[in-house]
């Protein structure tokens, strides 16, 4: 059945060829131009053109379009659903450049020329269209037969053309129905030379083909039994999912449509104007991957217009006759702007991830004039579009925009680096409540590139720290990953300003931020540490709560300061950097100096503060700071004498630490007058002392000079000539009996008393116990207990030496032992008047020291330990005791005692005694004795008592100022 009157149509065409000599040639040339000519308008567009026709058929029928390509045994079948073939369609198929689509384009249709069916001739000489409403077929062979039968000019032209004919001008009826389930089917017996081309065209079909043809929802491709199904898998928000054999790719899509200004249509052929009166644009990107290969512009089916953007871009551009290139003109320029707007909308709708910068065009890199124009327009639009994310302020809620919520709900957020707060099932009824929405919190703050900033590339390595620190400080700051070198070209193209080191320093000037914030900032600025000029004014937080400008001269607290609360050191007024801001090498490079408790205590400003602490408006915070430092430094009593000037509370007032006794110390009883107005020392306020004890332990008050035991004084390299004047030069050395002790020292250096101490003779190390003269006479037992331990015991054990200019090292009396030996500290007796319990050779000459005193301490106090000790300590005293008739001497020492004294003194000055020991219990006047130097002359004694002279009787005679026997 000839449903479409093909016989009449053929007759009309053949009549025109026979009646007009050139008509056959014109039709043949036109078809050849479309399919095989130099312009090649429809060559290699078989899939696209048939898909376009199928999409329009589905749109006209208002049904979801389904299209199936099937190639088996040399035949390509293309079946589709939708409006079946009608008479107007046959007119379009058989009329070159006379489309059936002359009216305003119906909604959902994309075809504009209506003659794209000519593409089938690229692979087949006998195309056939089967339809539920009837069909038509075409045949090159039958057309040649008809032309040959015409004879005349047509036959001659056919011969000249080598048998080439316009295949689609003559149609014959086709009675076979389309494949079941489809409304229309195009069957193409494929020429042998086109088989591989058909296979390649079918293999190259991409899922994005569905973007060009909105009427299609499903596309099936079968080649020799191998099936592939492409279909729309759904949409959420502004995303569309396309599946290929079940593998789903989701696309972020932006689209627009509207009316074209009528004046822009004037340049287009009349037949196109109605179809072009409405425009549409679409831009799409696959989520989680970039488009592969070179992209081209779609209009809306693929063209040969190159596109440098990695975006699927389609718009209803006017095309040249070839349908491969866009026709230039005012309409194209206007549509390029609409397409650019759609691309901008797509990019701004993308989640705020740095990967979106891959979509930003680069100036001057357009691959063709139209591409360059679109890219330029996109770039201009993006520069003013608020799509770059701001660095989130710490602890702020970070929701997503509506578009991002849609991505999140469909499980697509990870493609853009989003970390959802929950993992809702996108198909569950609670999915919407699980994801943040614009109603539940403010959307991400975004900024236009012209108002955005990112850190300079030299700081890219620490951009995460820097961006985190400067969030909310620098307006328009982008997140850290937007500062990478990879992002730089796109950001430069967008006009994003780079934040230099100087900009950072200027931005943070005057900020009040916690110390850890500054520490993060310093770490972030480390890569720029060489830029000393820019960083010179960097603010620095201090332990006293201030933030000062400039790093140079600031003190960096060391580990030993970690135990001290930062605000404790505030009263010292030092530029000590808060420990929470320390950790970066940047501060050291900029001139900050390491600080330990030792270096702080050695600082002149700290020492001056201690010296002036009595006059301080608030001495207590200063005292607490110094005490904390002393505790951390482990300073022992006496190590730092200057600390004794530290003002501490006592008796509702403030006094130097060196004038105070620690509460509970035995010294509160030992010193005379304690607790009275005449007390030599005050007592530290008990509450204050307890607080210090709890915070720092029991030794800190003593370390700053408060008394818990007797104070030890130390001085080095003292000129012997100046000994008597020590107290005048240094109040701390104003010791009792200093002048007398100085005489004893000089006598030890020059026993003869002839020349004194050589000029330049010095005491190597002077150590003394202070304030012994203040001890209450009834409290010496307690005082002796204090002297028996700790530093006082060390002083008593120490030996003093004088060093002469000629290098002699002479033992001299140690001050404290010298003083104690002379004072009545042992039951009212001076230790120098007593002997130790084991000094039996002195029995009778010296009384025994009390046995309730530490016996090991007695020699250190000056108690005589034996004859030689008594001779060395005080020979004059020993001579007096030997001359005392009320005393006795042990028999063992009497015979040679004077010889030993003379030998020990070796010419030293002594006071000759009035009496001489002649027996253990008897003495004689000096005029009644003689020194026995010639034993054979005993007859010369004449009643005198002989005294043994030992090895040097002359020295003994001089010692006692008595004659020798040989002199009688």
Image (cartoon, rainbow, N blue to C red):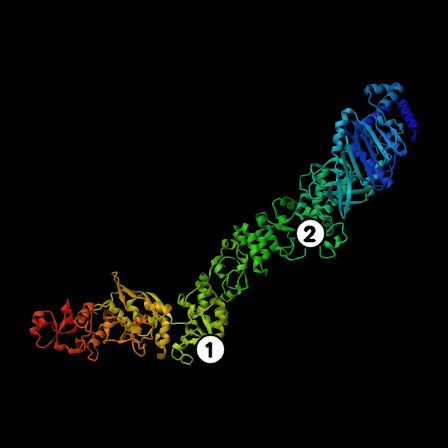
The disc label shown at residue 420, or none: 2
User: Quadrant location of residue 834?
Assistant: bottom left
Spot occupied by residue 750 in the image (x, y as percentages of width and height): 23, 67
Give the vertical position of 926 relative to 182 (above or below): below
**Quarter the C terminus occupies:** bottom left
Side of 397 where 460 appears, left or right: left
The answer to whether residue 755 is seen in the rendering is yes
- Asked which quadrant contains residue 96, the reply is top right
Q: For the residue carrying disc 2, how many other residues have a C-alpha within 10 Å: few (<14), some (14-19), or many (20+)?
A: some
Specify few, some or many for label 1: CA neighbours under 10 Å numbering under 14, 14-19, or 20 or more.
few
Q: Could you say which disc has been placed on residue 651 in the image?
A: 1
In this view of the protein, can residue 104 be seen by the observer?
no
Give the mark nearer the N terminus: 1 vs 2. Answer: 2
Q: Position of residue 262 (x, y in %)?
A: 83, 42
**Depth order, front residue of 225/652:** 225
When the figure is inspected, residue 376 is found, relative to residue 71, above or below; the finding is below
Give the mark toward the camera: 1 or 2.
Answer: 2
**Rendering coords of residue 128 (x, y %):** 85, 29
Inter-mark Cα distance, 1 to 2 = 67 Å
Identify the mark at residue 141; answer none if there is no mark.
none
| Residue 12 shown left or right of residue 411 in the figure | right
Rendered view: 711 above or below 363: below
**Label 2 residue SS:** loop
Q: Residue at x 33, y 69 (%)?
A: 796
Circle 1: element type: loop
Quadrant (top left/top right/bottom left/bottom right) for the N terminus: top right
Judging depth in this view, the residue of 140 and 770 nearest the camera is: 770
**Is 911 displayed left or right of 269 in the figure?**
left
């Amino acid at each position: 059945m000839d449903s479409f009157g093909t016989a009449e149509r053929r007759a009309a065409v053949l009549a025109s060829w026979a009646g007009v000599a050139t008509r056959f040639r014109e039709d043949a040339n036109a078809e050849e131009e479309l399919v095989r000519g130099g312009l090649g308008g429809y060559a290699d567009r078989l899939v696209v053109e048939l898909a376009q026709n199928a999409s329009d058929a589905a749109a006209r029928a208002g049904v979801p379009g389904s299209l199936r390509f099937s190639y088996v045994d040399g035949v390509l079948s293309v079946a589709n659903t939708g409006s079946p073939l009608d008479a107007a369609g046959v007119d379009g198929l058989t009329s070159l450049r006379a489309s059936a689509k002359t009216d305003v384009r119906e909604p959902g249709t994309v075809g504009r020329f209506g003659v794209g069916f000519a593409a089938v001739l690229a692979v087949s000489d006998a195309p056939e269209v089967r339809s539920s409403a009837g069909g038509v077929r075409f045949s090159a062979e039958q057309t040649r037969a008809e032309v040959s039968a015409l004879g005349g000019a047509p036959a001659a032209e056919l011969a000249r053309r080598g048998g080439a004919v316009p295949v689609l001008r003559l149609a014959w009826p086709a009675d076979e129905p389309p494949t079941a389930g489809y409304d229309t089917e195009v069957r193409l017996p494929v020429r042998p030379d086109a088989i591989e081309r058909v296979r390649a065209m079918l293999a190259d079909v991409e899922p994005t083909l569905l973007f060009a043809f909105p009427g299609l929802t499903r596309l099936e491709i079968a080649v020799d039994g191998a099936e592939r199904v492409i279909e729309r898998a759904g949409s959420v928000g502004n995303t569309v999912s396309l599946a290929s054999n079940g593998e789903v790719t989701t696309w972020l899509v932006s689209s627009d449509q509207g009316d074209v200004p009528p004046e822009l249509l004037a340049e287009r052929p009349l037949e196109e104007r109605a179809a072009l009166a409405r425009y549409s644009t679409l831009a799409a990107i696959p989520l989680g991957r970039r488009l592969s290969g070179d992209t081209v512009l779609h209009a809306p089916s693929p063209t040969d217009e190159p596109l440098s953007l990695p975006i699927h871009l389609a718009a209803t551009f006017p095309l040249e006759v070839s349908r491969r290139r866009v026709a230039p003109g005012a309409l194209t320029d206007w549509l390029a702007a609409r397409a650019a707007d759609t691309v901008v909308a797509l990019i701004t709708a993308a989640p705020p991830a740095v990967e979106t910068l891959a979509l930003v065009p680069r100036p001057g890199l357009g691959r063709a004039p139209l591409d360059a124009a679109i890219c330029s327009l996109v770039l201009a639009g993006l520069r003013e579009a608020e799509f770059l994310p701001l660095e989130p302020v710490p602890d702020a809620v970070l929701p997503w925009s509506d578009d991002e919520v849609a991505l999140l709900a469909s499980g697509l957020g990870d493609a853009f680096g989003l970390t959802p707060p929950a993992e809702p099932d996108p198909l569950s009824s609670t999915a919407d409540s699980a994801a943040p929405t614009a109603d539940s919190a403010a959307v991400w703050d975004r900024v236009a590139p012209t108002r955005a900033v990112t850190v300079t590339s030299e700081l890219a390595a620490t951009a995460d720290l820097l961006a985190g620190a400067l969030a909310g400080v620098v307006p328009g700051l982008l997140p850290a990953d937007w500062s990478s070198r990879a992002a730089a070209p796109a950001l430069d193209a967008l006009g994003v300003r780079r934040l230099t080191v100087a900009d950072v320093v200027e931005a943070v000037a005057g900020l009040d931020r916690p110390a850890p914030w500054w520490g993060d900032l310093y770490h972030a600025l480390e890569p720029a540490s060489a830029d000393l000029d820019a960083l010179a004014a960097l603010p620095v937080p201090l332990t006293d709560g201030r933030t000062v400008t400039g790093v140079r001269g600031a003190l960096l607290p060391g580990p030993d300061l970690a135990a001290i609360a930062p605000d404790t050191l505030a009263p010292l007024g030092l530029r000590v950097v808060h420990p929470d801001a320390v950790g970066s090498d940047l501060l050291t490079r900029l001139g900050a100096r390491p600080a330990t408790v030792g270096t702080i205590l050695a600082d002149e400003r700290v020492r001056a503060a201690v010296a002036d602490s009595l006059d301080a408006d608030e001495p207590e915070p200063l005292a607490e700071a110094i005490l904390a430092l002393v505790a951390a430094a482990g300073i022992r009593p006496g190590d730092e004498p200057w600390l004794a000037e530290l003002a501490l509370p006592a008796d509702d007032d403030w006094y130097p630490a060196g004038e105070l006794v620690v509460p509970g110390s035995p010294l509160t009883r030992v010193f005379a007058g304690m607790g009275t107005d005449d007390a030599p020392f005050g007592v530290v306020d008990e509450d204050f002392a307890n607080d210090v004890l709890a915070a720092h332990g029991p030794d800190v008050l003593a370390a700053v000079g408060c008394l818990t035991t007797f104070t030890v004084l130390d001085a080095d390299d003292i000129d012997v000539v100046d000994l008597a004047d020590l107290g005048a030069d240094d109040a701390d050395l104003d010791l009792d009996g200093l002048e007398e002790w100085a005489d004893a020292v000089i006598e030890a250096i020059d026993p003869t008393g002839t020349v004194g101490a050589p000029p330049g003779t010095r005491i190597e190390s002077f150590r003394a116990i202070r304030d012994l003269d203040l001890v209450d006479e009834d409290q010496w037992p307690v005082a002796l207990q204090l002297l028996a331990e700790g530093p006082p015991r060390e002083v008593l054990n120490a030996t003093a030496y004088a060093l002469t200019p000629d290098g002699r090292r002479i033992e001299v009396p140690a001050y404290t032992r010298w003083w104690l030996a002379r004072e009545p500290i042992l039951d009212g007796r001076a230790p120098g008047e007593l002997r130790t319990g084991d000094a039996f050779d002195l029995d009778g000459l010296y009384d025994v020291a009390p046995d309730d005193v530490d016996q090991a301490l007695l020699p250190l106090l000056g108690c005589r330990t034996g004859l030689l000790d008594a001779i060395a300590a005080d020979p004059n005293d020993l001579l007096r005791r030997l001359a005392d008739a009320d005393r006795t001497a042990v028999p063992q020492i009497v015979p040679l005692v004077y010889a030993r004294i003379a030998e020990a003194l070796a010419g030293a000055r002594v006071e000759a005694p009035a009496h001489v020991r002649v027996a253990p219990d008897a003495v004689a006047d000096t005029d009644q004795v003689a020194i026995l130097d010639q034993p054979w002359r005993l007859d010369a004694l004449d009643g005198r008592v002989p005294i043994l002279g030992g090895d040097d009787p002359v020295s003994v005679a001089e010692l006692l100022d008595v004659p020798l026997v040989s002199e009688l």
